[in-house]
Image (cartoon, rainbow, N blue to C red):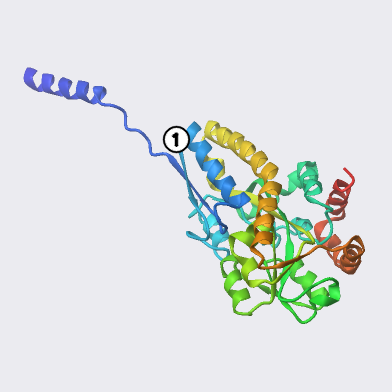
Amino acid sequence: MIKTFLATLAGSLLALAAPLAVADPIVIKFAHVVTDDTPKGRGALQFQKLVQERLAGKVKVEVYPSSTLVGDADELEALRSNRVQMLAPSVSKLNALSKALRVYDLPYLFDNLEAVKRFQRRDKSRELLGSLVTHGITGLAYWNNGGRQLSATREIHAPADLKGLTFRVESSEVLAAYYQQLGAEAVQLPFAQVYDALRTGKVQGAENPWSNLLGQKINTVQPYIVEDNHSFLTYMLITNTSFWNALPFEIRSDLEAILDEVTQSVNRDAEGINAKARERVTASGTSKILVPTPAEREAWRAAVMPLIKKYEGEVGSDVLRAAEAANRR
């Protein structure tokens, strides 16, 4: 009996002396559809780096760029099923779930990127981050990628020049309506298919910020680029609501602090990244860059004003007024 007792005691002491099992880190799979050297791509990598530095062993971020894990067509479903935990899709992809988010797609509403940033800092825009919770999605931040530039197979100076052309657009009713109103056709295609669609002539034009024009080599298959900044490509950093709410409070707070830092960096650097991309596109000589005159820009604005009026009821007059006010500081 004594031997049995001593054996049991020894086993217990050994168990107590053994190191406690270390829990596996929380894994955040961050998927996106663009390259690493775009504002979104850089933001994802910076988030990964800061999490590794500050939450090593607790949280691990895996970044999947260029549709290597999920693409445009299935990324939202992957998020809702928790196969990925973080995305940063264009707000255009989300405005079917929240009509108020269509404010970001209305053409010629914002004068420049600074106006977009001012709007995003105001209460009305901050409220929109929570507009997807009923769909199991939580908005965390806005990341910007500069103005959308129009590219095409022929010179475009006036709204009438779009007639007869087919343009690729994101999955946004507003973006499609914009081209249809001006006599063009709009085709919704995943981002990964844009280059081939332009190369083969399936579509004759598209709209992208400079960083995406360069990153996807769209300039090599589009002889004309109109620097019109008719709208601004805004990403919403989103997560699975159940996943996010289940995180320990301390870890979630640390992640929020890191995301605030990354968001400031992304939105501060977006203009510089796109300016450098513009320089490289210009230097390549592949495309003629057309810059609208003030008179031409006013003609475009007048042509799309009925579209803004049409969507005011869906977006909400309060949201629209807040966006317009951001142009005046």
In the displayed orientation, state which residue is furthest to the bottom. Answer: 164
Q: Position of residue 155 (x, y in %)?
A: 78, 74
* Front-lying residue, 11 or 251: 251
Left or right, 24 with respect to 202, comes to: left
Q: Position of residue 206 (x, y in %)?
A: 69, 69
Name the residue type under label 1. Lys
The reply to whether residue 97 is visible in this rendering is no
The reply to whether residue 22 is visible in this rendering is yes
Q: Position of residue 68 (x, y in %)?
A: 48, 60
As drawn, 2 above or below 191: above
Read off the residue under disc 1: 58
Q: Quadrant of the C terminus?
A: top right
Q: Quadrant of the N terminus?
A: top left
Q: Residue sitting at 72 percent across and 57 percent down?
A: 98
Q: Badge 1: few (under 14), some or many (20 or more) residues near its Cα, within 10 Å?
A: some
Which quadrant holds residue 253? top right
Which quadrant holds residue 181? bottom right
Q: Residue sitting at 56 percent across and 59 percent down?
A: 33
Q: Position of residue 261 (x, y in %)?
A: 63, 36
* Front-lying residue, 218 or 8: 218
